[in-house]
Amino acid sequence: MAGFGYELIYTFLTALTVLFFDYGQAGYEKLSYTALIFLFSFCCLTVWFFRLKQNGKLIVTGILLANILTLRLLHIQQPSFFTPHIYLLLIECFFTAATSYIGARLMIRFVRIRLLCIACLFLLTVLSFIRMLTPITTGFFTALLLLLILLSDEIRLRWDKEKENARSLHMISLLPFLLLIILPAALLHFPDQPYDWKPFVAMWDHVTTAAGRIRFDFIPGDDAVIGFSDNGSLFSDLRSDEKEVLSVKTDFDLPCTLYLRGIVFDSFDGRKWTVKKTTSLPGATLDTLETLSGVSNSDVNPGDIIKNLDLNLTYLDNKSAYLFAPLKINELRGNTEKILQKDGSYCFKRYNPYRFEIRESFYILNSDNPTFASYMKNLSPPDASAWKQTAQHLGTAYLKEGCRYEDYLQYRQFIEDAYTQKIDLPPALEQELSELFKDAGSDYEKCKLLEEALGKMDYSVSTDPIPDQVQSESDFLSYFMLDGKKGYCSHFATSFVLIARSMGLPARYVQGYRVKVNKKGTYTVNTGRAHAWPEVYFEGIGWIGFEPTPGHFAATDWAMRNESETEKPEYSIPEYARRQEATDLSVPVPKPKTEKSPVFRFSKKMFFIPVVSLLLFLTMVALAGKLYRMSTYRKMNDRQKYICLSKENLHICDQLKLGIRQGETLSEFATRLEESIGENARAFIPGYEMILYGGSESILPDLSDAQQSRDALLQYLKQKRRLQYLWQKLF
């Protein structure tokens, strides 16, 4: 029993560590109790299976097959109770337990493998501690516990001359004390932010930077794949990989193009975008509040300028640190505890959880309506009074720290510092732009003209690599706008941002997904929808996105009140605010109305068929084993038969707890057996002793003595232990 517990400790802790790190890297926050129960059960079954003899292994196999048949029948009867996720979980737990048992046996047996595992576990715990790896929190302490067990085992084996003797008992007795050390630490609060262990962090940065340089500089350009990435490099050739990453469900019928923003960049070196300047201010919230403040305090009807829409976003095969969301977010509903704002974007504190779902309420601008341009001519930044009035209408969430008027002024200064670097245009390009903008009446009209001009160029994902001499923003504009004039979204968005900055406008480069919707419904987003676009800041309305990529422009507009007399404003800002209270990330999700849970209906055949199948399997195993043993026994000579019966008699004695004791002779054992059961029970021992110690093959005891003892022992077993008697007769 001690050996079983010893192997189970190693197997279960190894399996737990593997699952915790695997699920943590996949974005899970915790393992379900169902997964833990499955894993522990499979670990116990695996260890038990390999410790059984042949007949026992066959019986366990039959039990497993009967359970599989039961699950299959339950799935046929009640498909809603057994989803594919359950089957995948069972398969994963089974294979994890089996491979962990193999690993545990190797660790127990071989010193070098044990030392290698100690080194790997130490590295894992260090990387987890400084958050270069992100296991499920409990996984860190599981790995630490396994590390302590391996160290303790190794120390005992090196200091104890007896080596294997009482090794398993020692580990089982030591485990409670190790748990007393680990459990209090596991119950303490685990900080969301990593410990700033600067030497390791710097080392990791160097490693990842070097790996990235190898990946993007030395691997040919045609290996770059279309898809979202937080890498801001401009590649030459792109290949398609149509993997489904998001699911978007819309609740509106307005035809429009949704730009689901991911990461925002501020600095460009001629070849690659990076993030160099950051702020702790909630830029996305401040931007939305500036838009609403400007619109609600203008002379226009708010419903002519903005609309409030909702969508549900579900992550599919998408392991990203960013929450994809439209520009003017009003409210996020769902599991938002792990979401924070970072430099105008929303991101997860860790990677997104598996199949993460969230509801996003946002505002969309009527930016492609011709009349909207006239509204943009009269913009002015909101004053403190207008800001506070709008915030009060929208709810207390907009009055909290980080969203005050003073914070808005700081955010405008950050925009000025981060997104308005002066760009020197090539003279030829400057002359072309001067001709392009000669009739523009506002900066917004200049941006629309630039958008239109870039949209007339050639689009292609197969482009020449950027020449080595391109080392600055001006070099890139000269190369792309005057010479190349062909590229994909990243090239056009970059050119737009740089030209807008040359005009003194704050502009930034954004990467995310572009989704064109026509009506209410569900839209699947694949990696081919990944996109890059520019955003320009205008005081009084905030950031506005543009679409300069050829073939991608799709107008988003609706009739204004002065264009359709029957069109009524959908709402005014204050009315919407009263209808919808605090708009904070921490607002809980309203419980949706769900259908009545399916009722589990028990069917007799769910019980009858697996039980009958198990009994038939066991009967077949017993019959096959019996026939095999009988056939083998008939082929033996009398001496071999006597040895076979004697070993069977000793096995029955073990079942009766009357087996040979340590240091006991066969004569002493025979006397004790006669006192416990009777004279017939000991009849086989003298002959067995002659065979063992006689030394001559010619010694042939009377076979009837062994048979007589077997009958006496079986009769006694039948009286004392009926189930073991049946087992003995069958197997």
Image: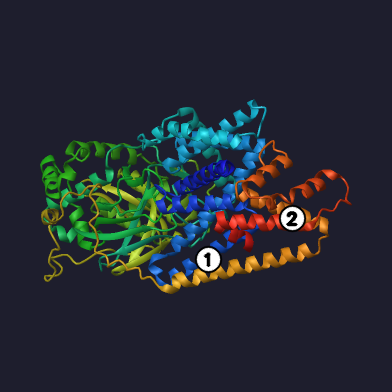
**On the rendered structure, is 720 left or right of 628?**
left
Q: Nearer the viewer, residue 560 or 350?
A: 350
User: What's the residue at 73%, 58% (across, down)?
Assistant: 707
Look at mark 1 in the image and give the residue it sits on.
66
User: As shown in the figure, which amino acid type bears the numbered disc 1?
Assistant: Ala
Q: Residues within 10 Å of mark 1 (few under 14, many from 20)?
A: many
Q: Quadrant of the C terminus?
A: bottom right
- The quadrant in which residue 589 appears is bottom left
User: As shown in the figure, which amino acid type bears the numbered disc 2?
Assistant: Ala
Label 2, label 1: how far apart the Cα atoms are: 39 Å
Q: Which comes before the other along the chain, label 2 or label 1?
A: 1
Circles 2 and 1: CB distance less than 8 Å?
A: no
* Outermost residue, top side: 159
Q: How many marks?
A: 2
User: What's the residue at 56%, 33% (across, down)?
Assistant: 170
Q: Position of residue 388 (x, y in %)?
A: 12, 43
- Is residue 32 at all visible to an observer of this figure? no
Note whether 480 is above or below 516 in the view shown.
above
Look at mark 2 in the image and give the residue it sits on.
706
- The quadrant in which residue 518 appears is bottom left
Secondary structure, mark 1, is helix
Q: Residues within 10 Å of mark 2 (few under 14, many from 20)?
A: many
User: What's the residue at 22%, 38% (across, down)?
Assistant: 402
User: What's the residue at 61%, 31% (across, down)?
Assistant: 154
Q: Can you tell which mark lies on residue 616?
A: none
